[in-house]
Image (tube, rainbow, N blue to C red):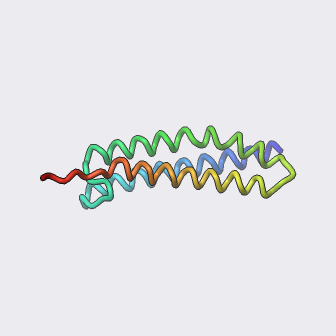
Amino acid sequence: MFVMYLGMSAGMNVMTGVHIAIALFAIITANAAERSIITKRSNKYLFLGVSIIYSLVVPFIAEPVMVEASHGDSPGYFRFLLFLIVLGFVFVQIIGYDLLNRVTEDD
């Protein structure tokens, strides 16, 4: 059981590192090309900050839930929790893009 916990912990660390790297790469390319879904520069940095905070906080919440679910008898429940975590991640990213990408038109 302890080996499984260490494996999941390492997996969460890798996922966190990959997400932070993607967030940094996205802000660098958005600033270099000036093409982005998020139009205002301040909103780009705000979204980067929110993404990095989200990357660091969510694994600490998700890991104990996943470890506890993996000890159960139902693999379907484990897959359902994994699906909810991924769906929640996508939902937060979509809401972040939607809120930060408000463009007001001048009359």
In depth, the one of 13 and 34 nearer the eye is: 34
Q: Position of residue 88 (x, y in %)?
A: 57, 50
Q: How many marks?
A: 0
In depth, the one of 107 and 14 nearer the eye is: 107
User: Outermost residue toward the left?
Assistant: 107
Q: Position of residue 4 (x, y in %)?
A: 78, 48
| Residue shown at the point (84%, 48%) measured from the top left | 72
| Residue shown at the point (39%, 52%) measured from the top left | 97
| Residue shown at the point (37%, 55%) measured from the top left | 26
Q: Is residue 84 above or below residue 61?
A: below
Is residue 88 shown left or right of residue 25? right
In depth, the one of 29 and 42 nearer the eye is: 42
User: Outermost residue toward the right?
Assistant: 73
Q: Which quarter of the rendering shows the N terminus? A: top right
Is residue 90 shown left or right of residue 11? left
| Residue shown at the point (38%, 46%) measured from the top left | 47
In depth, the one of 50 and 92 nearer the eye is: 92
User: Outermost residue toward the front?
Assistant: 107
Q: Position of residue 9 (x, y in %)?
A: 67, 44
Q: Position of residue 102 (x, y in %)?
A: 30, 50
